[in-house]
Amino acid sequence: MKKMSKRNYYRRFLSVTKGIFLKNPVLTMGFAVPFVVVATTSLQTAVGLSIGLLLTLVPVGLIMPLLMAKIPQDFQWVDYPLCALIAAFFVLPTRVIVGNISPALMDSVGVYFSLLCVSTLLFAARGKTRKEPDLAKVLLELVKIWIGAAMVLLLVGVVREIFGYGTLWGKALPWVKLRFSGVMVSAFGFILLGFVAALGKKIHRTILAAQIWTARNRGPIKEKLIELAHKMREDEEETPEELPKETVEETSKENQGKEQE
């Protein structure tokens, strides 16, 4: 089995991470923005919403293809209403699970946790996997969508909690001297979301640039370094006998002159 080249590795990495860095549903299409800019004000709320999204997005995405295969073509219009109904069924036990992890978390998330069952991210994921018959590929796509959304939620939650409250998961950080109350405002959530989108685009461009550089320099770097090391070693091992006679005579005359002085 041939070893994967760096160019193919970068290409495969971009393909696998599609939906996380590239075409992130939250950053590029604006799905679930209210959850990010309004509800995510701390790491706890970010974790709570991420768990709720995982326990609704993935099960609903896997159940819907099985149910819609049993429904006649004339009643396919029930797809999205049925999707919201099944999501609401999963939101109820999820509230209990998240509430046991942190009782105060549900109070901080508020009504936004219940709105997960009608999230645009849920419907977008359903639309993206609607025509895919393979459940394994559907699961992979759902997991990538969830990872991309959870990364944004966690990053925004951490930044807002540190600079807004001076804490992390409710514990005070002594090195944070300044606190900005404006960080908790929804307008700042939009600004921070823009910076996160720029960061995701920068990561994607960096990987793409590495792929282009590798394509232009197809020879492995290790082989080039070994070749350069061999050349340097040959130059160091060059003896006076291999030098021209004129160079040897000039060197001997200089040495005799120094001895006479």
Image (cartoon, rainbow, N blue to C red):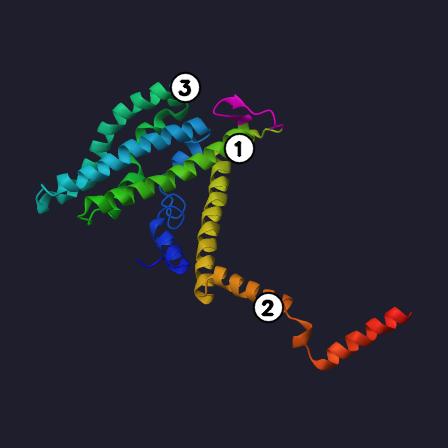
Instruction: Check disc 1 and give the amino acid type.
Output: Val
Q: Which residue is mark 3?
A: 104
The answer to whether residue 81 is seen in the rendering is no
Q: Are marks 1 and 2 in contact (CB under 8 Å)?
A: no
Residue 134: percent from the left, percent from the top?
Answer: 19, 47
Please state which amino acid type lies under the numbered disc 2.
Answer: Glu
| Position of the C terminus by quadrant | bottom right
Marks 1 and 3: which is nearer the front?
A: 3
Outermost right residue: 261
The nearer-to-camera label among 1 and 2 is: 2
Task: Tell me which residue sits at (46%, 58%) in the image.
Answer: 210
- Residue underneath mark 2: 234
Label whose residue precedes the other's in the sequence (2 or 3): 3
User: Compared with residue 102, is residue 69 higher up or lower down, i.e. above or below?
Assistant: below
Name the quadrant of the N terminus.
bottom left
> Would residue 34 appear left or right of 116 to someone viewing this image?
right
Between 121 and 44, the one lying in front of the other is: 44
Using a 10 Å C-alpha cutoff, classify the residue at mark 1 as few (fewer than 14 neighbours), some (14 to 19) or many (20 or more): many
Q: Position of residue 219 (x, y in %)?
A: 45, 65
Distance between the Cα atoms at labels 2 and 3? 71 Å
Specify the segment rendered in magenta.
165-177
SS under mark 2? helix
Mark 1 / mark 2, whichever is N-terminal: 1
Mark pair 1, 2: CA separation:
62 Å
Calculate the distance from the C-alpha at mark 1 to the C-alpha at mark 3: 21 Å
Q: Quadrant of residue 76?
A: top left
Q: Name the residue beneath numbered marker 1.
A: 183
Q: Which mark is residue 258?
A: none
